[in-house]
Amino acid sequence: MAEIDHNLSTHESIALNTTLEPTVPEATAQQTATQDLSSNPTETSHLAEPVAETHQLQAAAEPAAEPEYDDLDFARALASFDKEQAAEKDTAQSLTTEEAVITGTVVKITDKHAVIDIGLKSEGLIPLDQVLDHTGTPKFNVGDTVEVVVEREEAEGGYLVSYEKALRHKVWDKLEEASNTKTPVKGMVVSRVKGGLTVDIGIKAFLPGSQVEVRPVRNLDAYIGTEIEVRVIKLNKKRGNVVISRKEILEEEQNARKEVTLSTLEEGAVFTGVVKNLTDYGAFVDMGGLDGLLHITDMSWGRLTHPRDLVNVGDEIQVKVLKFDKEKQRVSLGFKQLTPDPWLDAIERYPVGAQVRGRVLSVTDYGAFVELEQGIEGLVHVSEMTWSKRMKHPSKMVKPGDEVDTIILSVNPNDRRISLGMKQLQDNPWEQLENKYPEGTIIEGRVRNLTDFGAFIEIEDGIDGLVHVSNLSWTKRIKHPSEVLKKGEKIKAVVLGVEPENRRLSLGIKQLQPDVWETFFAQHRVGDVIKGKVLRTAQFGAFVEIAEGVEGLCHISEAVDEHGKQITLNVGDEHDFKIVKMNQEEKKVGLSIKAIGEEATRAEVESYKERESSRESAPKGKGKGQGSSSSSSNSGSTTLGDLLKWKQAENEDNEN
């Protein structure tokens, strides 16, 4: 006992001794019966006489003869039996009241009880749940001795006995001592119950779920069948209840480790810790009683989608202390800081133009990220995957996990970016395009796409040319290519230009026909009078068709008659127009009706002057000289005065 006290004083966990002291129920029953008899000496003398006579008769009787019994013998035997029954009942009652621990022998094990010979005429019955361990295997075998406490006599026969109560009586004092000294005890987790676990510490004790770990535990079933250290925190001997805690022991151990950790913790220090928990933003690492946060951005020089890509719960890893808040006891940890930053010499290791091989990490709408080494990844933009412009999505070419060859296009260590290319490993079809399709070549292709500004024509795989809307027709004003083209149809076009560096191929359809503007400008000059038809009008004038596909503009100021009266130009009207302006580069022609009237007026003035000169006779002398002078003057250029005189004379003739 002194040795046990020493162990308790050092607060070491102990395995409680559950071996019970043997008792002799037969002696107890004999003693009880003797006491009953001595208390009634008269009855004792009466019982002694028939017993002596019976022995004498048995000794004198012959072996072949059958004993003869009379009524007196039967009465004496019945009295003896009743007395024995009363003595056994008193013994059982005494055992039940005092909850004495007795030793019995296992007779058999049924599906409900373990049957025990407890020295009484009726056998003891232990409930099966006290007999089986956590695996469902019986703790006893037939013939084993076991200590029990008699609880009560069953109506159908036998005595209900308790193995657990016997254990409880034996270990209760030790549990009280362990509770007072806060000494840990060892126990086996037997089963899961509502709100916690049942632990066998010599007797069954209750371990609440909140007292299993320092942090809440979701799966308590995982503890079944494991041996743990616990501390007794509550005892109720009357009810036989024991409550234990594992959390208290763990917290004390954690605090002890925490003190050691805090004494050596400083920024820049390297610790070995255990990953306790994972979140989307990082991992919590136990550094020895103190948890630190390892953020996902400090896990790898490369990119991680989730911390589980690098570590798992329970992993032992080395980490570096990046920041330590002593007051709040918050620690920021780093893992990647234990290795040099691979971007520091990325330019030297990945020169532009070098061919490198990598693994595709992820694919997005705009390209694919390729890991060249741990912490170094580059982007292959969708435009750098193929020379063709028809690829809809990068996933059509690569998928995560693929090993691909790429070319280094650019390196930016400051932004930690590397641009990669895949198409550069293939022949560029645009480099030979200028020789293959020189300017003026007529090609045939399929209309692949229509846009507001033109139509894309596929002339070969991956090579599209653009027919701008302005190159669809010489004569028609086309607002959208769909007015003359349909998607999927085959057409012919003329190559207008090739830009390999910009991957542009310009095509034209109207160039298949002669340019009507060139023909018009070659055949007409300023001053020509031509017939035209009004196509459309505007506030500033009217657009007039003067040849097939050729339009001219008659400004509103030029749409007046010979009398200066404004002429209304309606769509569909036909008039004679005089060309007053021509610009071949801009394909513009200026028209005028007014100019035609002015030309006619000059002709009439000249005709009038000629008539006046012929009517006047040339007199000799001074008058003749004057007339000659006047005629000579009129034969010159027409002046404003001449026009006014002609108008006045014309009006006088009309009045006469």
Image (cartoon, helix red, strand yellow):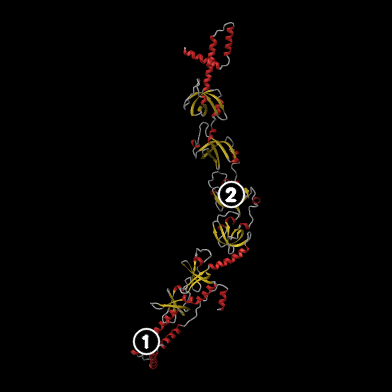
**Residue 482 screen position, x and y as percent:** 49, 37
Q: Residue furthest front?
A: 327
Task: Indicate which disc, 1 or 2, sits on the residue closer to the N terminus.
Answer: 1
Q: Quadrant of residue 258?
A: bottom right
Q: Residue furthest right?
A: 348
- Label 1 element class: helix
Residue 372: horizontal and vertical position, in percent? 61, 52
Q: Are marks 1 and 2 in contact (CB under 8 Å)?
A: no
In the displayed structure, 473 sits above or below 93; it is above
Looking at the picture, how far across and down is residue 571, in whole percent?
Answer: 47, 27
- Can you identify the residue that label 1 sits on? 79
Identify the element where label 2 is drawn: strand
- Residue 150 is situated, as x and y percent measured from the top left of the image, at 44, 78
Picture quarter with the N terminus: bottom right
Can residue 648 be seen in the rendering of this structure?
yes
Q: Amino acid at mark 1?
A: Ala
Amino acid marked by disc 2: Leu
- Residue drawn at point x = 55 percent, y = 11 percent: 613
- Cα distance in 3D space between marks 1 and 2: 107 Å
Q: Nearer the viewer, residue 261 or 333?
A: 261
Residue that extends furthest to the bottom in the rendered view of this protein: 60
In this rendering, does residue 171 appear at all? no
Label of residue 379 in the image: 2
**Residue 89, disc:** none
Q: Looking at the image, which residue sits at the far left?
A: 71
> Disc 1 or disc 2, which is closer to the eye?
1
Residue at screen point 53% across, 63% down: 215
